[in-house]
Image (cartoon, rainbow, N blue to C red):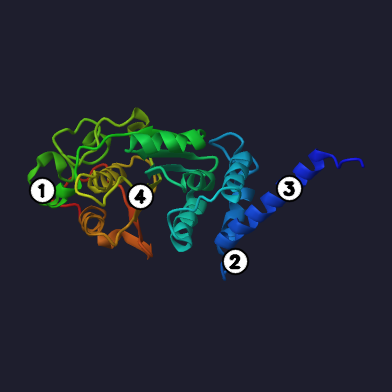
Amino acid sequence: MRAFPQKPLFAAAAVAALVAGALLVSSFLIGADRGLLCSISPVFSRISFGGGGGSDTTGQLAEALLYYATTSAVPQQSRAEIRLTLDVLRRRGPCNFLVFGLGRDSRMWAAMNAGGTTLFLEEDPEWYELVLKTSPMLRAHHVKYRTRLDEADKLLRGYRKEAACRPGAADGISGLQRNGGCPLALVGLPREVYEREWDVVMIDAPKGYFPSAPGRMAAIYSATVMARGRRGEGDTDVFLHDVDRKVEKAYALEFLCKKQRVGATGRLWHFRIPPVKANETTTAETFC
């Protein structure tokens, strides 16, 4: 008896796997209000025809869809939280998007900003290598922090006494790049972090759940400084995850400011930070 050709069987199995994976993705993306899928569709149509800033943007989106359809990777944020950021990326993209942390959702963030520049900063060297091994197309840097979570209270109380940390002296890139006098300033980062103007910032790292972890104090402070020193038009949209934790909440209210919070869902807060005017001077000791 003649055996069936193996290639058609393999192709059929592959198609079936993709369809099954796509259904799993759809179950995550589609909600009662047609969910994220309808929101992502305009992203495809907007950038597929000459959306500048990157190459093969349609391919980038397709690769991300294939990845999530054929793996067990699940984004770390909830659908509602992702939707909050997606709405901003749709409005501003393609844009410059700075993400603190690499994770299971990194391909998703890069795809949602296809055609723009998405840069990831990760402090864990082993996790950095692991993620880039499976997703080498991501633009990422391994970075080091000078802070510890168990110093968060002391740093929050003491920054006002440090002239190098205060508003005005610390605004803009000069307030970060060589500001070793402020323990909350992120110094020694790759040059492109300082040279590029970031439209959207996502703070979902570094680790902040054990005493010796870096905590997110410096990331929150530095995002504020970059936003206040923005040279171009418009504000900076900053998202902070895990605001149910004491340190994240306290630093958000101290630096990102409650009056500048424009959205919230689940454990995610959204702030819109205006730049300091060129001729504006301040003698304030706090940012809010």
Q: Quadrant of the N terminus?
A: top right
Residue 131, percent from left and from top: 45, 38
Judged by depth in the image, the label closer to the viewer, 2 or 3, is 3
| Residue at 28% from the left image edge and 45% from the top image edge | 219
| Residue at 35% from the left image edge and 39% from the top image edge | 122
Q: CA distance from mark 1 to mark 3?
A: 63 Å
Residue 266, percent from left and from top: 38, 65
Amino acid tagged 2: Arg
Q: Secondary structure at mark 1?
A: helix
Q: Nearer the viewer, residue 8 or 74?
A: 8
Counting residues from the N terminus, which is met first, the one under dot 1 or under dot 2?
2
Judged by depth in the image, the label closer to the viewer, 1 or 3, is 3
Q: CA distance from mark 4 to mark 3?
A: 37 Å
Q: Which mark is residue 13?
A: 3
| Residue at 24% from the left image edge and 37% from the top image edge | 145
Q: Residues within 10 Å of mark 3 (few under 14, many from 20)?
A: few
Counting residues from the N terminus, which is met first, the one under dot 4 or under dot 3?
3
Judged by depth in the image, the label closer to the viewer, 4 or 2, is 4
Q: Residues within 10 Å of mark 2 (few under 14, many from 20)?
A: few
Counting residues from the N terminus, which is met first, the one under dot 1 or under dot 3?
3
The residue singled out by tag 1 in the image is: 160
Counting residues from the N terminus, which is met first, the one under dot 4 or under dot 2?
2
Q: Nearer the viewer, residue 242 or 229?
A: 242
Residue projecting furthest to the right: 1
Amino acid tagged 3: Ala
The residue singled out by tag 2 in the image is: 34
Counting residues from the N terminus, which is met first, the one under dot 1 or under dot 4?
1
Amino acid tagged 1: Arg
Q: Residues within 10 Å of mark 4 (few under 14, many from 20)?
A: many
Counting residues from the N terminus, which is met first, the one under dot 2 or under dot 3?
3
Q: CA distance from mark 1 to mark 4?
A: 25 Å
The residue singled out by tag 4 in the image is: 204
